[in-house]
Amino acid sequence: MRRNFEILGMCAGWFAVLAQLYLMLQNRETVLVESLLRFISYFTILTNTLVALFFTTRVFGADQKRLALFHQKATPMALTSFILVVGLVYQFVLRNLWAPTGLQMVVDELLHTIIPILMYVYWLMFCSKAVVEWKQLSKWLFYPLGYVVFVLVRGHFSGFYPYPFLNVLELGLGSVLLNSCFVLLLMLLVMAALYFLGKLLRPKQ
């Protein structure tokens, strides 16, 4: 069953990411390089790509030295935390901003609903009992912190912000920083919740 989950996660993840890339390039309104930069400016895309890579390393048994990051004990919990936040922010903040149809609707649900649930169920069934140190887990917070810095710096020069709550041009830097803090706090809370849930599920020595 575990391998079936991993194959499903790999296929769903790569299909969603690559299909979104196809749709974005098909409907692009700027040059190719800028379109690709905008594509990787979405936390949703980056995180779903990491999840797809994680499942791929599990399916193909990738070299643990070259891809050590995906074999660390804290990695499943960290990726589960981030992909759950992707889903939560979309469901409660972004879903009502547009109404995709056709293939875009399918991809949208995969990226923001199905894959987050799949990753959570996978972690709960197969990874939640692993011994994870909080110090190792908390290091993953540099990922969203680095993302915020990247988006703000790039947005300053390009004028493009991937999410409305990060749009400095419309909201101002102060509001954007406050919004970023709220999202980072949500990530920390979800991460802490999974950490303590894992400790509860772990067999007592």
Image (cartoon, rainbow, N blue to C red):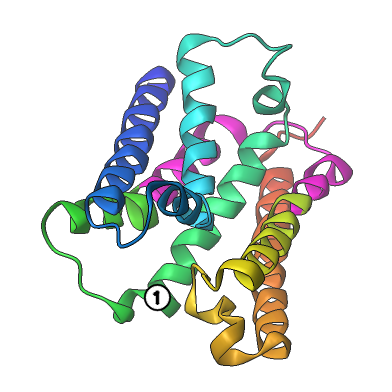
Characterize the local packing of mark 1: few (<14), some (14-19) or many (20 or more) Cα atoms within 10 angstroms: some
Q: Is 117 left, or right, of 157 in this rendering? A: left
The x, y position of residue 189, in whole percent, is: 70, 66
Q: Residue at x 71, y 27 (%)?
A: 69
**The residue positioned farthest toward the right in the image shown:** 135
The x, y position of residue 141, in whole percent, is: 76, 53
Our reading of the magenta stretch's main secondary structure is helix
**The residue positioned farthest toward the left in the image shown:** 102
The x, y position of residue 28, in whole percent, is: 29, 57
Q: Is 172 left, or right, of 80 in this rendering? A: right
Q: Secondary structure at mark 1?
A: helix
**The residue positioned farthest toward the front in the image shown:** 31
Q: Residue at x 78, y 52 (%)?
A: 142
Q: Is residue 172 above or below residue 164?
A: below
Q: Is 69 left, or right, of 12 in this rendering? A: right
Quadrant housing residue 135 = top right
Q: Residue at x 30, y 81 (%)?
A: 96
The x, y position of residue 138, in whole percent, is: 81, 50
140 in magenta = yes
Amino acid found under the numbered disc labelled 1: Leu
Nearer-the-camera pick, 192 or 8: 8
Q: Which residues are magenta?
A: 115-141
Q: Is residue 179 above or below residue 136?
A: below
Q: Which residue is mark 1?
A: 94
Nearer-the-camera pick, 64 or 40: 40
Q: Is residue 128 above or below residue 174?
A: above
Q: How many marks?
A: 1
173 in magenta = no
Nearer-the-camera pick, 166 or 96: 166
In what quadrant of the picture does the C terminus appear? Answer: top right
